[in-house]
Image: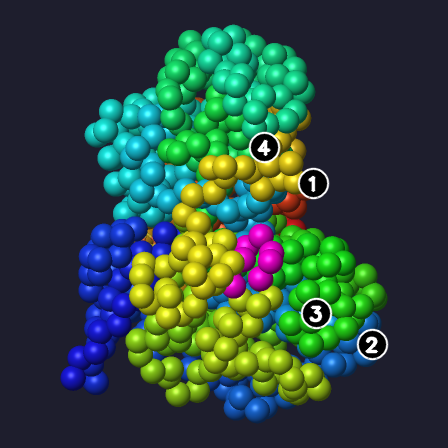
Amino acid sequence: MTTTTDTHCPYCSLQCGMRLAAADGAETLVVERPGFPVNRGALCGKGRSAAALLDPASRLGTPLVRERGELRAATWDEALSRVARGFAAIRAEYGADAVGVFGGGGLTNEKAYQLGKFARVALGTANIDYNGRFCMSSAAAGNRIAFGLDRGLPFPLEDIPRTECLILVGSNPAETMPPALRYFRELRENGGTLIVVDPRRTRTAEQADLHLQPLPGSDLALALGLLHLLIADGTVDTGFIEARTTGFGQARAAAMAHWPERVERLTGIAADRLREVAHRFGRARTGMVLTARGPEQQSKGTDTVGAWINLCLASGKAGRLYSGYGCLTGQGNGQGGREHGQKADQLPGYRSIEDPAAREHVARVWGVDPDTLPRSGRSAYELLDSLGAPGEDGVHGLLLMGSNPAVSAPRAARVTQRLRSLDLLVVSDLVLSDTAQLADVVLPSAQWAEETGTMTSIEGRVILRQQAVDVPDGVRGDLWLMRELAERLGVGRGFHDDPETVFDELRRASAGGQADYAGISYDRIRAGDGVFWPCPAEDHPGTPRLFLDAFATPDGRARFAPVTHRPAAEEPDAAYPLYLTTGRVLAQYQSGAQTRRVEALNSAAPGPFVELHPLLARRLAVAEGELLAVTSRRGRAVAPARITDAIRTDTVFMPFHWPGAGRANTLTNPALDPTSKMPEFKVCAVRVEAAGAAVVPAGAARSGQGEPV
Ligand code: SF4
């Protein structure tokens, strides 16, 4: 008999609805679920092939422990005992903060919530953060500063086709979330204008009315220049500014110092082109700016987001129907994962861990004394960089759940070395990821279709992934893992392995916070197409559109950000004369730990490459497919050349999905944004040359050993 289950894709933040058909002894199939409004049945290749992840051959089926340098199979009892003993010993020697926790933006809300609680209550450590810090922390910070609240999109995707002018900055949904492209197509069909800002002429940029190709790292100057032109054009909305904002004076002064010819020099975009964009955006009655990792993954990401928000505020395109600023989240639960306690400085419901009232509320739900809760810990890169540092300054044991920083962290060779230096590295994952290969204990976790849990999508819509198939023998869920470990650490109470029980506790913990889930239940989600937060009560309809009446600041007004241009942390020079920017390709997802194991995807995108302009290729005397060595101050990566006039002549691009010789993050710069602690993935200075005969073939999965750190 075949059973069908409505669920959602295991990958990106669009969280496309899909249906799984499972029958005894037969392969589980992904089938269309046309009734889910976000994707109306459409799926990209990753979603269509998602059932391949359930193949026992490609996933872990038993715990592993390291013995005499090698990983060997172990029982759960042996593995968990080793973890509990190891963490207890580290805490006894160095203190509770010497055990760290590193989570993931793909974990369900229930797992993310319980992981935050596990870190603070069972381990007593302040040091918990997650890879979502690398995803949209700059947008989160920019949103909080301007609007008093961070939800990636303050409106549903269905509003996009109804706006008149949309500027998409540093985002390539044609490759990262293809089903979302229809919203942009419909916008143009309705007569709207789509403007794409990207140093590469991506498949998304090809569909735009206007494409701006700025220098990597110059998005802040671009936004300031556009605001200058709005002011000069007289298209600022003074009534809106007076009624609903504060701080325009400073923003105006900063913009006036960014006249078109100066911005042309800073961005490489002709002044006339800037004027055209400003005219179109300024004169439109409704408009949106959407940013993604391009402007956000910079050491000035928060200010850059602030500058784009300023543009919306000055032209009255925020807090109004079909207008506003939004951020396109990347990871499946990038939104929910940061709302409920995985971040070093936050408690569930988007509460600050430093706020006495928030500590009191959450401690009451958790049944602990508020004074026992740790304070803010280290942000993601700071945490990774502290691994194995001497004495009490270092984190000596790490529990890593659903993340693969050996590939995805900046300055990855150093991070790999740090992971190796730990007394105890414990990794819970469904596959033997590149990071799990370094671990002392590997715990095989249930995934996506094998368990139930909620996710919060790109729109702030809380949806339910429902279990469709049995958990394989030898595999356990992460909720169970936390409960068992807590018991072995002597904190038996308060940890559960039933997702709905955990969600009900999350509802109580989030009640009254900004990300208020109190009124959301599994039954409500099942009965509809998800529920938008905030939803403070069971009879509350949820909130698809934020800020229409007031912003979430104490006085209800949005705040202009007082920002001004500054260069990237590392600009090209004589030794490293080119920009490197990094990103994703259609057939792979994030660090590739899952998609590299799916034949249909991996054969479409089997290895890394270096994209460069024909003029640069001629100058370097390299041909298509020839191996190139790309060197930054942090290391060297080797991958074949892909020559295209879609990229600037002064910039090379590498996708970051692969480990080994072609690992792009060997090169990237961990310079951090001072507010969001986002590393500068999107821009660094490199040297490029033909690799010569002595290098390993690009795409070969070599270890990171021996690379500069
Ligand atoms: Fe899955 Fe994202 Fe593709 Fe939709 S767009 S099918 S959520 S990977």
Task: Give the labeled residue for mark 2.
Answer: 93
Mark 3 and mark 2: Cα distance apart in space: 27 Å
For residue 80: magenta?
no
User: From this viewpoint, which residue is outermost toward the left?
Assistant: 1
Point 51% across, 58% down: residue? 536
Q: Which amino acid does the dot numbered 3 rest on?
A: Ala
Main SS, magenta residues: loop
Task: Give the labeled residue for mark 3.
Answer: 363
Task: Give the labeled residue for mark 1.
Answer: 674
Mark 1 and mark 2: Cα distance apart in space: 32 Å
Task: Give the labeled residue for mark 4.
Answer: 558
Q: Which amino acid does the dot numbered 4 rest on?
A: Ala
Q: Residues within 10 Å of mark 1 (few under 14, many from 20)?
A: some
* Nearer to us in this view, 581 or 210: 210
Q: Residues within 10 Å of mark 2 (few under 14, many from 20)?
A: few
Colour convention of the picture: rainbow
- Mark closest to the chain's N terminus, 3 or 4: 3
Q: Position of residue 520 (x, y in %)?
A: 45, 64
Mark 2 and 4 residues: CB-CB less than 8 Å, in contact? no
Which residues are drawn in magenta?
Answer: 511-518
